[in-house]
Image (cartoon, coloured by chain):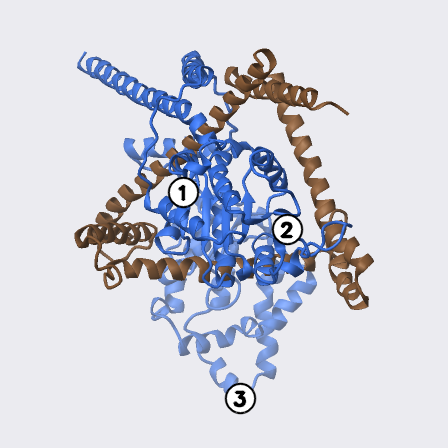
Chain colours: A brown, B blue
């Protein structure tokens, strides 16, 4: 339809215009920003619909129906019926309930099983093995020891920070012990460092996005006027 | 009145004839206390205008006589009273009554001379009604004379309350609380609190102070200038660290150890918003993989993943002679989140079997000899989302049979995913722009003419990061100074 340079020009122009429209939010909410956001949301929704139609309906339903044998067709009926029941939830609540229950059950089971085997146990095991130097004799013992102590302290104290239960008796009702308060104070230090690291990460990612956009605008003008 | 006066006489005559022997034996004796005559005397002392009130209907009179035959038997009164007589009646004889008779004879002449009847204490105690109706005060004409029983002849022992008696209001006791000033003020405070609960408060729209807007513009202007000027100049003056971190070193080592045409699965799970950072980190990795001739298979759990893959390959294809379906393939969108990944990890061929209406995926060269996940030489997770990275590690690692998992991640995901490297679940990590830049810096001579996206952004990134740091330091200092000044002002006001 368009030659490559024209297509690049149009693409670059759209990219430039919409980037400026989004940047205009710096001066406050304005119609340009809102138009850009609405266009983006609509475009994203349309694209997702197309992807789902192609990747799910065609690839996983229609194509197997056309090419599969009777057994495969019978198995395809199950997700088809469940899909229709789920769709009926838009108007009628009851028929789709057990499909939602199935989705929630399967999703939760997969997530919990994965978390247990892939995160909880390996992470706990790694924390326990911090002081196992048998496999790493050549490494600097002191460095490893200090690192292990810091990581272990941070892990245990941060977990203890989220222990909100208190011991209650007649003289001191509902108060944490002195030891727990001390642990909580140390844990706050570790948590503050974690928040700082998270903030720095988010800031760095956003700044890189800004840098990439600025380079994109400059490249557009370069290609328009200097090449 | 005649009726009342004559009835005892008549009845005594009648009963004398019909009385049993034991009564007749007592009838000849002189009664110790003639109640009938006493009653007669009392009745005579009553004013004449009281008569209508005491007149009884014939039926009532008959019933009264019938119900109390003893009352009409004057001759028996003495014998009855002598049997169970209270102290105050003991020794009360007819002789004692004689002067009373004389007195009653003179009552009619001068009623004021009548001495008030002195009731014994036990009779007074039987008059609780008097306490209630004490205020009513019955006149002499309203007093009722008892005509029967041991109280026969007594007046106003039980006040006549035949419906005409008026009741009075019960006393009103004061309900004022005795409380001191503190209690009063606390009660007023509680009352105000309770009243304020029911009153809807107006939510005042928070007006942004002009200083905030100006500071926002200043920050934005500084940031844009810090980004725009180095980008415009295209400087590449800031140095990139030569020394790799251990995670990056391990990553590169794993890539170099791959065979020439090793099949590699790449999970592209990042949003378009962070494409700049992710492409800068991913491009040198792809560059190395393509240099080695690895067969690349892409998949994504994000619907926009395919777009990102296409965009990335647009950058890479002019440099490397790769063709879709020959050296690389995009399996597309993988739905189902954790469950979908688990199914794919268990049986990749069954999960992503069809490529639209075109046919079967797994005959293509990039997927040749791939039956299960462990057939891939390595799994590379490219994501800006720590949760997505975590789910892939959790679900895929048990099915990889020791094959390495590598991660190309955004800087914002690093704090959450680094523990997986420390625990050995991930073999190596390239983090954000800095990781990409260091990776590029350490690439071999063979790849010197490659994309170098991270190097292009490096100066701008570095200078703008310095600008942000200065802004944060400047803002914090300004806030500190402002706080100190405000505190001093407050102190001065307090001292004044």
Say whether residue A87 is visible: no
**Residue to which mark 1 is pinned:** B414
Q: Chain of mark 2?
A: B
Up the image or down, B418 lies above or below B39; here it is above
Q: Which is nearer the N-term, disc 2 or disc 1?
A: 2
Task: Identify the residue at image location x=68%, y=40%.
Answer: A48
Residue B484: x and y, percent? 23, 18
Image quadrant where residue B317 sits: top right
Nearer to us in this view, A153 or A159: A153
Q: Chain of mark 3?
A: B
Circle 1 crowding by C-alpha within 10 Å: few under 14, some 14–19, many from 20: many
Give left or right: position of B70 versus A4.
left
Asked if the residue under mark 1 is in contact with the one under mark 3, i.e. CB atoms within 8 Å, the reply is: no
The reply to whether label 2 and label 1 mark residues of one chain is yes
**Residue to which mark 3 is pinned:** B21
Secondary structure at badge 1 equals: helix
Nearer to us in this view, B186 or B2: B186
Up the image or down, B480 lies above or below A141; here it is above
Gap between marks 3 and 1 measured at Cα: 128 Å
Can you name the residue that lies furthest to the bottom here? B21
Q: Chain of mark 1?
A: B
Residue B321: x and y, percent? 60, 39
Give left or right: position of B38 versus B358.
left
Secondary structure at badge 2 equals: loop
Say whether residue B143 is visible: yes
- Which numbered tag is attached to residue B335? 2
Image quadrant where residue B493 sits: top left
Q: Nearer the viewer, mark 2 or mark 3?
A: 2
Give left or right: position of A121 versus B262.
left
Q: Which is nearer the N-term, disc 2 or disc 3?
A: 3
Up the image or down, A25 lies above or below B54; here it is above
Secondary structure at badge 3 equals: helix
């Amino acid at each position: 339809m368009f030659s490559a340079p024209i297509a690049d020009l149009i693409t670059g122009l759209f990219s430039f215009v919409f980037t400026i429209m989004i940047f205009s939010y710096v001066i406050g909410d304005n119609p340009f920003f809102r138009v850009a956001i609405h266009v983006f949301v609509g475009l994203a929704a349309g694209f997702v619909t197309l992807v789902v139609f192609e990747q799910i309906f065609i690839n996983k339903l229609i194509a197997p129906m056309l090419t599969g044998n009777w057994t495969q067709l019978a198995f395809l009926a199950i997700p088809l019926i469940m899909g229709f029941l789920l769709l009926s939830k838009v108007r009628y609540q009851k028929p789709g309930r057990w499909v939602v229950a199935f989705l929630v059950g399967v999703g939760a089971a997969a997530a919990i099983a994965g978390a247990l085997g892939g995160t909880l146990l390996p992470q706990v095991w790694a924390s326990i093995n911090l002081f196992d130097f048998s496999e790493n004799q050549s490494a600097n013992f002191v460095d490893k020891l200090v690192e292990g102590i810091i990581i272990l302290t941070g892990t245990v104290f941060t977990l203890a920070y989220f222990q909100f239960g208190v011991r209650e008796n007649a003289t001191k009702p509902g108060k944490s012990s002195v030891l727990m308060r001390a642990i909580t104070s140390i844990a706050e230090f570790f948590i503050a460092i974690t928040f700082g690291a998270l903030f720095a990460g988010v800031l760095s990612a956003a700044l890189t996005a800004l840098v990439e956009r600025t380079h994109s605008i400059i490249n557009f003008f370069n290609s328009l006027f200097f090449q | 009145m005649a009726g009342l006066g004559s009835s005892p006489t008549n009845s005594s005559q009648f009963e004398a004839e019909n009385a049993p022997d034991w009564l007749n034996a007592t009838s000849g004796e002189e009664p110790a206390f003639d109640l009938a005559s006493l009653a007669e005397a009392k009745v005579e002392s009553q004013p004449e205008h009281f008569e209508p009130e005491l007149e009884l209907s014939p039926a009532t009179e008959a019933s009264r006589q019938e119900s109390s035959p003893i009352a009409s038997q004057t001759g028996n009164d003495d014998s009855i009273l002598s049997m169970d007589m209270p102290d105050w009646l003991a020794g009360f004889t007819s002789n004692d009554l004689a002067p009373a008779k004389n007195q009653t004879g003179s009552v009619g002449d001068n009623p004021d001379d009548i001495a008030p009847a002195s009731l014994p204490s036990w009779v007074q105690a039987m008059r609780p009604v008097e306490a209630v109706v004490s205020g009513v005060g019955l006149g002499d004409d309203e007093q009722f004379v008892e005509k029967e029983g041991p109280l026969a002849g007594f007046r106003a022992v039980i006040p006549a309350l035949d419906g005409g008696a008026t009741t009075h209001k019960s006393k009103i006791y004061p309900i004022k609380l005795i409380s001191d000033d503190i209690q009063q003020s606390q009660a007023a405070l509680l009352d105000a609190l309770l009243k304020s609960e029911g009153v809807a408060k107006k939510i005042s729209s928070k007006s942004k102070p002009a200083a905030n807007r100006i500071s926002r513009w200043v920050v934005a202007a500084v940031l844009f200038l810090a980004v725009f000027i180095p980008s415009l100049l295209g400087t590449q003056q800031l140095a990139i660290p030569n020394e790799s971190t251990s995670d990056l070193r391990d990553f590169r080592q794993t890539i170099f150890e791959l065979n020439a045409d090793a099949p590699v699965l790449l999970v592209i799970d990042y949003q378009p918003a962070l494409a700049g950072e992710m492409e800068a980190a991913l491009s040198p990795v792809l560059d190395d993989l393509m240099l080695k001739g690895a067969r690349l298979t892409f998949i994504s759990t994000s619907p926009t993943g395919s777009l990102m893959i296409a965009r990335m390959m647009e950058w890479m294809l002019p440099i490397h002679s790769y063709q879709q379906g020959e050296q690389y393939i995009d399996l597309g969108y993988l739905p189902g989140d954790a469950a979908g990944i688990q199914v794919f990890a268990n049986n990749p061929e069954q999960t992503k079997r069809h490529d639209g209406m075109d046919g079967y995926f797994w005959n293509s060269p990039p997927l040749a000899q791939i039956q299960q996940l462990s057939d891939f030489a390595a799994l590379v997770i490219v994501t800006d989302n720590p949760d997505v990275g975590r789910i892939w590690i959790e679900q895929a690692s048990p099915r990889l049979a020791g094959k390495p998992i590598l991660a190309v991640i955004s800087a914002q995901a690093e704090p959450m995913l680094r523990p997986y490297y420390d625990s050995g679940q991930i073999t190596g990590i390239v983090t954000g722009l800095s990781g990409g830049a260091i990776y590029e810096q350490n690439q071999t001579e063979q790849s010197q003419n490659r994309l170098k996206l991270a190097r292009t952004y490096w100066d701008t990134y570095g200078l703008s990061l310095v600008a942000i740091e200065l802004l944060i330091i400047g803002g914090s200092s300004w806030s500190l100074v402002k706080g100190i000044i405000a505190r001093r002002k407050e102190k001065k006001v307090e001292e004044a």
